[in-house]
Amino acid sequence: MLNKSIIALSLLSLLTGCSLDGDDGQDGAQGVQGTAGNNGENGTNANSALNINLIGRAVLNAQSPEGAAEIVAYQASKKWIYAINSSGDEAVVNIIPADTFDTAALVKDNEGIVTATNLASAITLSLNENTPGDANSIAIDANNQLLAVAMAATSMGEVGQIAFYNISGDTPVFIKNLTVGALPDMVAFSHDGAKVVVANEGEPNGDYSIDPEGTISIIDITNGTIADNALSINFQDYNNKQAELEAQGLVFANPTGRTINGNLINTTVAMDLEPEYVSISKDNKYAYVSIQENNGLAIINLEDNSLELKGLGFKDWSNLQFDASDKDGGVNFKSYPGLYGMYQPDTIASFSWKGANFIVSANEGDAREYFFDASDEADCIAKGGLDYDAKDGCLAYIDESRVEDLALAANFDYLNNDDNDIGRLKVTTVKGDKNNDGQYESLYAYGARSFTIWDSNGLVVFDSGDQIARVTASVHGNAFNNNEDENKGDTRSDDKGAEPEALTLGKVGDRLFAFVGLERMGTIMVFDITNPYDVKFQDYFYNRGLEPSADISGDLAPEGMTFVPAAQSATNEALLIVGNEISGSIAVWEIATQ
């Protein structure tokens, strides 16, 4: 079995003994630290409620796999896996039967990693035959047997479309396109199939001369009939409330006031907000939308389409520990009073407990960095650029700096601002200099290196603290904080760590679990969140080679995941389907109770 388990019971005190502070704008609500589970070696899992095995694997576009399998969905009626494949010249969806699994074909190599396959694409849906642009997201509705695909426009700033297909027959049949906002990045059906919600990210182009507003689109479906138009919800009512939003814990980073490439930049709040990911509450009353770069959450009341915007605040690292440097020679955990983490979630999910709604977030983090074309360094600077790179072009804007390049206030005299301490850590430059004297009294890093449970008020119920770093360091040693495309440990410690990005929830037996995919490590953590106030670390597994300096192998960079309940699975056990961006592979894990 490929379940790589934690074997050191002595680590439990380390994993559970850390205090934790969430934040609703400044220092935040007190989070509740969960307890760690423990699993035996090589599949014995004596202290785990789950038995996890890799039973299916496919590789799309093996010659050029990157981007071939990112976002996945599952059609229960046919037991088909759908995967967006953006590795070629055209946008396609590969459809892979998952009705049988020849597990004997999944032979391990000398490192215990599976690179073989036992699943293959049976249908290739050519999206560009009906819709121009590139595919960003897919969703399936079992109520009406519909497939929705979020398609970004071919030109920056133009509105995108949602392409709908009927999937009740032998092959998908195109129905129609509906216009939504700029850069639709995620699409989701309500659980009853009555609505489609789309997060339109609206990113700027390289020199900010085009910066469309981020919006949220709502599409009604009545008795299986898709509406002809989408309702657009924007953030224009917040344009005069930036200071109020910042006080709540949102972040705004843009080059407002500068002239770039001949244009005076004036970015409004509505332009700066970039909706990322959608989750719809189990009662179908609310849509929760993460706004990653801005460290925010939008809540849409789907009964009246009203909008509420919440800042997620900042995580206090003073009582937690992590490794802040990729140049310190291995695993070196320290605490940093005065350092905070912007949660900046990518994937979110939601569930209910005691009749109340809760939101779960994978706190990946994301900086802003934009380039435009210039002939050379002199041309770049003349056009208002900040720096020139022969590969990337002229740097228009960046909100990121290493700590060692900043002047720190006296409250940071306790540390060494160098490669062996906090100097390599990447932080934002738009927060922390409270009195604008050029010295930073606080530092704000990207992401929280954790997953978090929030209540509907936007308060932290649970945060995994520093567990992700502790578990990966305990299991992998110096190979922890690896990158997704090379085997050289500790390379992401200065950035966002293992980078929790993918997330899905699923019920196994009578327990609800959160599966958290670590993009850079290529690994997955499992937490029992049945009671959000009593969260327990449950398991850790992966299929990725980590031998130093060896070629990368296995399943790399989990980007999207979907959970299949046991009743909808061909094996009569729950499944976790993972789309891995770098390896172009789809991994199917069977999740059974002990």
Image: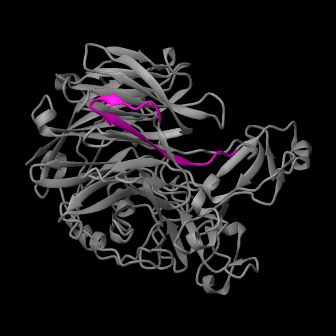
Q: Residue at x 59, y 30 (%)?
A: 153
Q: Is residue 426 visible?
A: no
**464 or 279: nearer the viewer:** 279
Report which quarter residue 445 is drawn in. Answer: bottom right
Asked if residue 197 lies left or right of residue 194, the reply is: right
**284 or 23: nearer the viewer:** 284
Looking at the rendered image, the quarter that the N terminus falls into is top left
Asked if residue 352 lies left or right of residue 263, the reply is: left
Q: Check if residue 226 falls in the magenta segment.
A: yes
Image location (x, y in percent) of residue 563 = 25, 41
Q: Is residue 500 visible?
A: yes
Q: Residue at x 24, y 66 (%)?
A: 532
Q: Is residue 36 above or below residue 197?
A: below
Across the whole image, how many numbered discs are drawn on residues? Answer: 0
**142 or 79: nearer the viewer:** 142
Image location (x, y in percent) of residue 487 = 47, 43
Residue at the bottom extreme of this rendering: 410
How is the protein colored in the picture? one colour
Report which quarter residue 327 is drawn in. Answer: bottom right
Image location (x, y in percent) of residue 585 = 37, 29
Asked if residue 309 lies left or right of residue 156, the reply is: left
Q: Check if residue 278 falls in the magenta segment.
A: no
The stretch of residues the image draws in magenta is 211-229
Image location (x, y in percent) of residue 177 = 47, 25
Q: Is residue 267 above or below residue 142?
A: below
Q: Residue at x 53, y 28 (%)?
A: 134
**540 or 464: nearer the viewer:** 464
